[in-house]
C-alpha cells in the first residue's frame, strides 16, 4: 500500500483539479527522514514490494525490492561512516545512472550528510568551484577514466576533499566502494540526540546556473521529499505497484523529481535505463519490453520519439506521458497524439522547487500551457512593483511565503544570505520567470527575467560560458545567448568581437570551439558562433543580450550544431 495518504491532511481521493487545488494539503511528521520513514517503512509493511528495475545497454539487469534497497543503503551508510562522514558533511555523487546512486542517496540521508548530485560532464574548473563553494569532503564517482581524471586534476585546488571513492573498476589512489561496503553491517540504527536529523536540516544541494555569477547552491531540507507527492501522484499520475520512467541523469534535479522521492512515497517502482547514449528506438523498446506505466521526459526526447514509427511499439501499458524542462512545442504534442492517441501533460518547476504548475489529474490540456498552479503553492503573476497584473498580462511568477514556507521550496541558497534575501524579497519567492495567466487559470511561459538558456533540458548560464570564452586570446568581447532550435529548444550561441591581430574565419571558429570543449562541460559549449564588429550595449556599457536574441528570432543556424 502506498504511503502518500499519510501525508495528506484530507486522506481521500480528489474529484478533479478544482477539488485538488482547494483541498489538497500536505503534512509531515516531526523529524521526517525519507530513508527511515518511507523506504524502511515499506520493509515492514511490504518487504517484497518492488522498488526498482535497472538495466543497461550491456544486457545487465537487476530488480530490487524495498527490503533490498534498505539493506544495501544501510551497508553503504556504515561504509561512509567508517570513513568519517558525519551529519552535515557534503558528499558529491557523480554516478550518471548507476544503481549505487540510490543506495548512496539514502545512506547520506541516514547519516544526515548533505548529498550533492553532479553531472559527469563537469571539467576541472567546474569541479574546483563546486568543491570549494560547498566544502565537499568526499567525491564518489563511477569508473569512467576521463571523468575520474578530471576529478584528480581538480584535487590540488580542492583542499576540503579528503576521499575519492570509485564505483565499479578499482583505480589507483581511490577507495573501492563495493570492496569497502562488502563487509559492512546491514544494520544501521536511526541516529538520536545530536546526530538525529530534523525537518529543517540541510539534506540536498544542487548547483544551478544563474546569469550573473557562478552557479547558485540550491539547498533543500529533510521535508523536501514530501512536496513531491504532488509531482508524482497528481502530475505523473503514478500508480501503486506500477513502473515509472523519468528520463534524467542523476546529476540534475529532475532525478529527484522523477527517480526517487515522490514515486516511492506513492508506491510505484522506478525503471532506470543506464543507456550509453540516447537512441529513441532503444528507449521505445524498453518502454514496450518492461511495460512502463508512467513516463516523463523533456520535450527534446519527445521531438526524437515522434520521428519514429510509434505504431511499431507497444505503448499500451503507459497511462500517462508527461514533460517538463522547457516549453513543449504544439506541433510535437499534436504529432504525438496523432500517432499514439495519448496526451502529453506538461508541467513546470525549478531546481528550487517541486512542481509549481502542471496539467494535473485529468485536466483538459491546452498545448503550450504549463497547466495550472500546484495545490501546495500560492502563486501569483506580478508586475515589477509586486502588484498583481490583469488576466492575460505578462508578469513574473511568484510564490507567496508570508503565511508559511510551502513544502518542496528551497530552504535558501547555501552560504549566500544576500541571494536568499533577494529571492524571498517582499514575502514571496521570485521565480525569475515571466508568464501570463488566462481566464481559466492556465499559465503560459514567456521567458526568463534574466538570460538563462535552456537547451535539451539543461539550464545554462551565459556568464559561465562567457567566462571560458574570454580566456581565449582571440576573444576580445562576447555575449552568449540562446537561439531557437527544433531539437533542443535552444542552442547556445556565442557572439564574438575578435581581439586585434586576429581575423574572423572558419578556422578561428573551430579553434575557439575546441578550446571551450576542453575547458567546460560539453552541454555548455556554443553550437553557433557569430563574429561581429561590436556588441549592442546600453549607455552604461552593459551588453544588451536581448537585442541579440531579438535579431535571432526565427533563425535556426545549422552551422555548428551537434546531435542530442
Image (cartoon, rainbow, N blue to C red):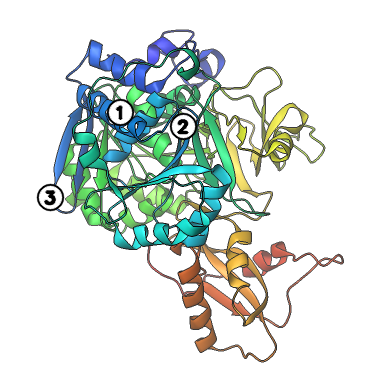
Quadrant containing the N terminus in the rendered view: top left
Residue 345: percent from the left, percent from the top? 42, 37
Q: Nearer the viewer, residue 106 or 294?
A: 106
Check whether the beta carbons of the residues at disc 2 and disc 1 lie within 8 A of each other: no
Q: Kindly identify which residue carries mark 3.
A: 59
Q: Residue at 68% of width from left, 36% of height from top?
A: 420
Residue 106 position by quadrant: top left
Q: Quadrant of the C terminus?
A: bottom left
Picture disc at residue 78: 1
Percent of width and height locating residue 116: 46, 40
Classify 488 as above or below 162.
below
Mark 1, Cα crowd under 10 Å, few <14 / some 14-19 / many 20+, is many
Q: Residue at x 47, y 61 (%)?
A: 124
Going from N to C along the chain, the mark reached first, 2 or 1, is 1
- Tag 2 residue: 364
Rendered position, 204 above or below 6: below
Q: Earlier in the sequence, mark 3 or mark 1?
A: 3
Label 1, secondary structure: give it. helix
Front one among 320 and 449: 449
Amino acid at each position: 500500500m502506498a504511503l502518500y495518504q499519510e501525508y495528506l491532511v484530507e486522506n481521500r481521493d480528489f474529484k478533479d483539479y478544482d477539488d485538488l487545488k482547494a483541498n489538497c494539503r500536505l503534512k509531515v511528521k516531526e523529524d521526517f527522514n525519507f530513508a527511515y520513514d518511507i523506504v524502511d517503512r515499506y520493509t515492514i509493511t511490504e518487504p517484497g514490494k518492488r522498488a526498482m528495475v535497472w538495466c543497461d545497454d550491456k544486457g545487465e539487469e537487476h530488480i530490487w525490492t524495498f527490503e533490498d534497497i534498505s539493506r544495501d543503503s544501510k551497508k553503504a551508510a556504515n561504509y561512509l561512516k567508517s570513513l568519517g562522514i558525519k551529519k552535515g558533511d557534503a558528499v558529491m555523487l557523480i554516478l550518471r545512472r548507476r544503481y549505487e546512486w540510490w543506495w548512496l542517496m539514502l545512506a547520506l540521508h541516514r547519516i544526515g550528510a548533505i548529498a550533492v548530485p553532479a553531472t559527469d560532464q563537469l571539467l576541472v574548473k567546474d569541479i574546483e568551484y563546486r568543491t570549494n563553494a560547498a566544502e565537499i569532503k568526499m567525491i564518489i564517482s563511477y569508473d569512467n577514466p576521463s571523468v575520474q581524471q578530471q576529478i584528480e586534476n581538480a584535487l590540488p585546488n580542492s583542499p576540503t576533499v579528503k576521499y575519492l571513492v570509485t564505483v565499479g573498476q578499482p583505480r589507483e589512489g581511490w577507495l573501492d566502494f563495493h570492496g569497502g561496503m562488502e563487509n559492512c553491517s546491514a544494520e544501521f540504527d536511526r541516529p538520536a540526540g545530536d546526530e538525529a536529523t530534523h525537518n529543517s536540516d540541510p539534506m540536498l544541494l544542487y548547483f544551478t546556473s544563474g546569469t550573473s555569477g557562478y552557479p547558485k547552491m540550491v539547498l533543500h531540507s529533510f521535508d523536501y521529499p514530501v512536496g513531491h507527492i504532488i509531482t508524482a501522484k497528481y502530475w505523473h499520475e503514478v500508480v501503486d505497484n506500477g513502473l515509472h520512467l523519468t528520463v534524467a541523469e542523476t546529476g540534475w534535479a529532475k532525478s529527484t523529481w522523477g527517480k526517487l522521492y515522490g514515486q516511492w512515497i506513492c508506491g510505484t517502482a522506478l525503471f532506470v535505463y543506464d543507456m550509453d547514449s540516447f537512441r529513441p528506438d532503444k528507449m521505445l523498446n524498453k518502454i514496450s519490453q518492461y511495460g512502463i506505466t508512467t513516463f516523463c521526459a523533456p520535450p527534446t526526447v519527445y521531438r526524437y520519439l515522434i520521428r519514429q514509427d510509434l505504431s511499431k511499439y507497444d505503448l499500451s501499458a503507459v497511462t500517462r506521458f508527461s514533460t517538463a524542462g522547457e516549453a513543449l512545442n504544439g506541433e510535437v504534442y499534436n504529432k504525438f497524439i496523432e500517432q499514439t492517441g495519448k496526451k502529453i501533460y506538461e508541467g513546470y518547476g525549478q531546481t528550487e522547487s517541486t512542481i509549481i504548475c502542471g496539467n494535473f489529474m485529468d485536466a483538459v490540456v491546452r498545448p503550450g500551457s504549463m497547466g495550472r498552479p500546484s495545490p501546495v503553492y500560492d502563486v501569483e503573476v506580478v508586475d515589477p512593483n509586486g502588484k498583481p497584473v490583469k488576466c492575460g498580462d505578462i508578469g513574473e511568477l511568484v510564490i507567496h511565503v508570508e503565511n508559511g514556507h510551502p513544502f518542496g521550496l528551497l530552504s535558501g541558497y547555501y552560504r549566500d544570505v544576500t541571494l536568499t534575501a533577494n529571492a524571498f524579497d517582499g514575502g514571496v519567492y521570485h521565480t525569475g520567470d515571466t508568464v501570463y495567466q488566462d481566464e481559466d487559470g492556465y499559465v503560459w511561459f514567456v521567458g526568463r527575467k534574466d538570460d538563462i538558456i535552456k537547451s535539451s533540458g539543461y539550464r545554462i548560464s551565459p556568464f559561465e560560458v562567457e567566462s571560458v570564452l574570454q580566456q581565449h586570446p582571440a576573444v576580445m568581447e562576447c555575449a552568449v545567448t540562446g537561439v531557437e532550435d527544433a531539437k533542443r529548444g535552444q542552442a547556445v550561441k556565442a557572439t564574438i568581437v575578435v581581439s586585434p591581430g586576429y581575423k574572423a574565419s572558419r578556422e578561428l571558429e573551430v579553434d575557439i570551439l575546441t578550446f571551450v570543449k576542453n575547458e567546460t562541460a560539453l552541454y555548455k559549449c556554443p553550437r553557433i558562433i557569430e563574429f561581429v564588429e561590436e556588441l549592442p550595449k546600453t549607455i552604461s556599457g552593459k551588453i544588451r543580450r536581448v537585442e541579440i536574441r531579438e535579431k535571432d528570432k526565427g533563425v535556426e543556424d545549422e552551422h555548428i550544431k551537434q546531435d542530442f
